[in-house]
Image (cartoon, helix red, strand yellow):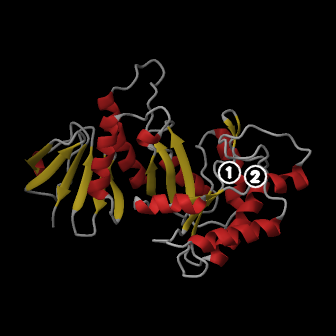
């Protein structure tokens, strides 16, 4: 079944991050058979979701999984077109109630599983990148679960991993950067593997319009990159609610196609971000009346969040709406 999915993904030229679900009924029963069953978030998961009982069996299985898709020519899936080198260890392990469960156990239980998985994955594939299971947000209950994990997990993951489904304009990018720093990972990068701009109204305000959602999409993603995120997975229309709508999708695609291969993203004011591009261009994302740096002169190309294209004089330009400005060398 996993091979079938991989063949579909590679036919669509999708890059893949694999999520390790280390739960199976026969194993769970051996040391957790008397523990309570829970309602998993996903129907595919069993009703007990503790760290594996049989570490040796877990290591053997995980080694086979990574080896099958690493593309090194040894025991690879027949027809593997390109390798899978990115793995996250479980998903949202602090989600233990409310909408359902992804894990049962303490921070210490998850940490032990993370360490074992990291050692196994990197032994099977020395090119692998291991992410923590996505942190469901920066709310207190999630931060409390993850703080002891991260504080003790040095050398057991390559990248941090945060989620924000409609919770924060820039997907907790600044708070999560600070969280990694405070727990001893100042030099560690992070991905946002579930990102959805907020679609619910703030208290006392009406629902955001389609146009407002498009604007916040452009500024939210630009902000998150400037705060340090190196990859962002846009949930967008894949959200069960239908997502923030086609205007937001279009704004996201505009940014993605314009700066997808940027080499760095830097704040240039509190309402502007510069993306340095490998071909020597700079792409500035500006909003809330921000202007271009005084060092930029002459005519520049602008594209509004809604796709409106113009050529303007750099010295006179201010961004009344979220706008991308390309400056060529």
Q: Do the residues labelled 2 and 1 touch (CB within 8 Å)?
A: yes
In which quadrant will I find the C terminus? Answer: bottom left
- Left or right of 79 on screen, residue 36: right
**Residue 239: percent from the left, percent from the top?**
48, 38
**Residue 54: percent from the left, percent from the top?**
84, 63
Please give the name of the residue rendered at 71% of the width and 56% of the height, measured from the top-left corner.
149
Asked which quadrant contains residue 250, the reply is top left
* Other-residue count near label 2 (Cα within 10 Å), few / some / many at <14 / 14–19 / ≥20: some
* Residue 118 in the image: above or below residue 18: below
What residue is disc 2 on? 107
What residue is disc 1 on? 146
**Residue 132: percent from the left, percent from the top?**
62, 58
Residue in the foreground of this view, choosing between 199 and 325? 199
* Residue 295 in the image: above or below residue 79: above
> Dot 2: what SS?
helix
* Other-residue count near label 1 (Cα within 10 Å), few / some / many at <14 / 14–19 / ≥20: many
Labels 2 and 1: the sequence-earlier one: 2
Residue in the foreground of this view, choosing between 299 and 67? 67
- Left or right of 193 on screen, residue 75: right
Asked which quadrant contains residue 122, the reply is bottom right
């Amino acid at each position: 079944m996993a091979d079938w999915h991989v063949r579909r993904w590679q036919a669509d030229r999708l890059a893949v991050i694999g999520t390790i679900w280390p739960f199976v009924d026969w194993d769970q029963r051996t040391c957790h058979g008397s523990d309570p069953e829970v309602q998993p978030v996903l129907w595919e998961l069993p009703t007990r979701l503790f760290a594996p009982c049989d570490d040796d069996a877990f290591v053997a299985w995980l080694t086979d999984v990574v080896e099958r898709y690493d593309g090194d020519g040894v025991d690879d899936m027949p027809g593997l077109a390109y390798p899978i080198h990115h793995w996250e260890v479980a998903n949202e392990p602090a989600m233990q109630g409310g909408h359902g469960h992804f894990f049962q156990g303490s921070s210490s239980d998850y940490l032990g599983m993370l360490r074992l998985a990291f050692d196994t994955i990197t032994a099977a594939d020395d090119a692998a990148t291991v992410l923590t299971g996505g942190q469901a947000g920066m709310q207190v209950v999630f931060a409390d679960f993850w703080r002891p994990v991260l504080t003790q997990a040095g050398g057991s993951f390559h990248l941090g991993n945060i989620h924000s489904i409609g919770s924060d304009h820039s997907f907790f990018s600044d708070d999560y950067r600070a969280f990694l720093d405070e727990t001893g990972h100042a030099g560690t990068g992070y991905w946002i593997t579930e990102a959805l701009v907020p679609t619910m109204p703030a208290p006392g305000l009406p629902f955001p319009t389609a146009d407002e959602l498009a604007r916040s999409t452009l500024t939210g993603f630009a902000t998150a990159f400037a705060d340090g995120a190196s990859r962002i997975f846009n949930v967008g229309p894949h959200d069960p609610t239908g997502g923030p709508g086609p205007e937001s999708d279009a704004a996201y695609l505009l940014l993605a196609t314009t700066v997808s291969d940027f080499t760095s993203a830097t704040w240039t004011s509190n309402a502007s971000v510069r993306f340095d591009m490998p071909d020597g261009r700079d792409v500035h994302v500006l909003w809330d009346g921000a202007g271009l740096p005084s060092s930029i002169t002459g005519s520049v190309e602008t594209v509004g969040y809604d796709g409106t294209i113009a050529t303007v004089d750099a010295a006179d330009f201010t961004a009344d709406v979220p706008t991308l400005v390309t400056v060529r060398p």
